[in-house]
Image (cartoon, rainbow, N blue to C red):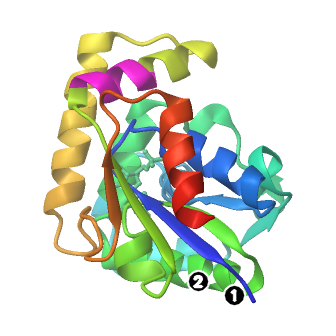
Amino acid sequence: KRLIVTIDGPAGVGKSTMAKRLARFLAIPYLDTGAMFRSVAWKLGQGAWEWPEADIEKALSGVEYALSGVGEESVLALNGVPIGDEIRTEQVGMWASNVATLPVVRTFLKKAQQRLGEKFSLVAEGRDMGTVIFPDAPHKFFLDASVEERAHRRFLQLEAMGKPADLKELEAQIAARDHQDRNRAVAPLKPAADAVVIDTTEMDREQVLAALKEAVA
Ligand code: C5P
């Protein structure tokens, strides 16, 4: 039987890192659904969120996702091409948040995500994994942390990718993106009623990982 573990939470909280590590522990793939929204935003381009719905639908009709590998080695590909680091900027994050307000995009990605969940056991991370996409998942987590701490974590992550950013600017960008994600009409960011909520502000990675492992064991 396939196992689905969901990890939701705001930007920069460390969902991807935890999802990768937990997926390795469970020897299953992890699914970065933020990368799906980012890749759609990247593919459609700036301003696409103002296009007529039919044009967006048409542009998405040729898009297919494939997943391979397990743990950190999980690879998500769009039409056969692995999604790369070009989507990992705060600017593309905001474009992703903009297209993520559109029902046409959410409906499209919901199908793609649920299809992957029928094929694989997954640690699925995003904003609505526990609330909308995998409501029956047996293990649901919601990670949170202060905006200052999240900006700092994202700062270190971008730096490690060779994309240095300004910490104060990052904090403002993350706060704006969270605000939009929490207040949109469709699938707003919030914990599922049955999610385990963990405030990670004062925790290091190993402590968070230990808490997740213990809960799924
Ligand atoms: O997690 P990440 O920062 O890569 O996500 C980028 C954006 O995609 C989020 O700010 C959010 O607006 C959107 N998203 C979403 N639902 C998901 C995953 C991401 O709306 N499941």
Q: Residues within 10 Å of mark 2 (few under 14, many from 20)?
A: some
Q: Residue at (37%, 61%) from the top-left corner?
A: 127
Q: In the image, residue 46 lies at what x, y percent?
A: 40, 46
Numbered mark located on residue 114 in the image? 2
State left or right for residue 136 relative to residue 78: left
Q: CA distance from mark 1 to mark 2?
A: 6 Å
Disc 1 crowd, CA 10 A, few/some/many (<14, 14-19, 20+) = few
The image shows residue 64 at horizontal and vertical percentages of 71, 73
Q: Residue at x 49, y 58 (%)?
A: 37
Q: Is residue 152 magenta?
A: yes
The residue closer to the viewer here, 68 or 145, is 145
Viewer-closest of 145 and 73: 145
Q: Can see residue 19?
A: yes
Q: Is residue 94 above or below residue 79?
A: above
Main SS, magenta region, reads helix
The residue under label 1 is: 118
The boundaries of the magenta stretch are 148-154
Q: Nearer the viewer, residue 22 or 65?
A: 22
**Total of numbered circles in the picture?**
2
